[in-house]
Image (cartoon, rainbow, N blue to C red):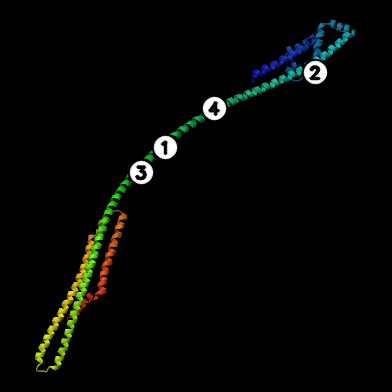
Amino acid sequence: MTNCEWRSSGGAEDEAGEDEIHQYHGDIVIMTDVYESPAREDSPMRLQGSSASSASVASRLYGTRSRRDSLGGSSSESDLIAFGGDQDTLNDFSSQMNQFNTFTKRYSELEERNMSLSDEKTRLKTENSVLKERMHNLEEQLTDNEDRFKQLLNDEKTRGTESISRLKREKELETESWNLKYQMLEKDLNAAKKDVERSNEETKRVRNDLEKTENKLEEAQLLIEGMEDERIQLERQFKKFKEEAQQDIDSSSEMVEVLAMETEELRRKVDGPRSGSMSEHIGDMHEEMDALKAKVAELMREKEEMADQLLATSVERGRSLIADTPSLADELAGGDSSQLLDALREQEICNQKLRVYINGILMRVIERHPEILEIGEEGESSPS
């Protein structure tokens, strides 16, 4: 409610109070004049701002009546004295006085109500002014808050714009980074594909080499089987030759012993004059013994040569087997680490087989024919 509304409501209440007073005092001219006079003078009790009692109002009314009676002169007093003898008039006057007192009381109540309304109006005006001041303060606060919030909104918009720009830049940088990583991965993938193709080619080549090596290994095994058959035949021939040589040696030794015994016996039997012919016969026998020894030595040399030939043949066959296989350097030149390891294992297995084969040949020679290694010693001891 604004100040104008309070003012209009207060004025309406005052006018309603005045109309009510005029209605009650319409029949009594004195009370009407008395009420109108204070109303025209703007109610001195209201100007004082204090509540008036019924006694004070009555005294004021009585003073006003006294002033009016003094103005009317002595004729009014004579009228009152003239009325004193009439009982009806007195009763009428008494009832009017009672009515007057009632009106006075009502007037006092209305006056008090009017004063309370005036106080309420004053209070409402004060509250209105306070509320107006508060409203002005709130409007100023609202204006300040609007300005502050506008500034905050602008700051937030600026920060939001900067954040969006920064996020866009970061997104662009991240996109570029992922594109570079994608390109690098594509390059790595292409390189890996090329490596796979190259590995497949190497695998095919190694498989072909392996097939060739397996074929060569089969050929070598066949060759080894053939060499084993030849070795068995050579051993048989060597054994036969050894038996024949041993028989020749045994027969030659028996002949030498027989000749030696005969020579000793002839030495004992023959006399001195016949010593010349016997010495010649003994010389002939010694020559025959030397020839037999030379023959035995020749047979031993042939035996040694045959043993050497057997060993040389075995060694040559082993060398040819090694020469037919692909070299280790050639295998190391092409192929990755796994293929090289496989090739080295295969080569090691092949070498082990060759060593076992050669060692087997030597062990058989040592076990079955150890005299081959003693030929030199026998050859040295025989001339002596």
Dot 4 or dot 1, earlier in sequence: 4
Asked which secondary structure carries label 1, the reply is helix
Q: Residue at x 16, y 84 (%)?
A: 255
x and y percentages locating residue 163 in the rendered image = 45, 35
**Disc 4 versus disc 1: distance between alpha carbons?**
36 Å
Position above or below: 49 against 273: above
x and y percentages locating residue 147 in the rendered image = 53, 27
The disc label shown at residue 171, or none: 1
Dot 1 or dot 3, earlier in sequence: 1
Give whichever of 136, 259 is nearer the camera.
259
* Disc 3: which residue: 185
* Disc 4: which residue: 146
Dot 2 or dot 1, earlier in sequence: 2
**Disc 1 versus disc 3: distance between alpha carbons?**
20 Å
Circles 1 and 3 in contact, beta carbons < 8 Å: no
- Residue type at mark 4: give it: Glu
**Disc 3 versus disc 4: distance between alpha carbons?**
56 Å
Give whichever of 45, 4 is nearer the camera.
4
- Residue type at mark 1: give it: Lys
Asked which secondary structure carries label 2, the reply is helix
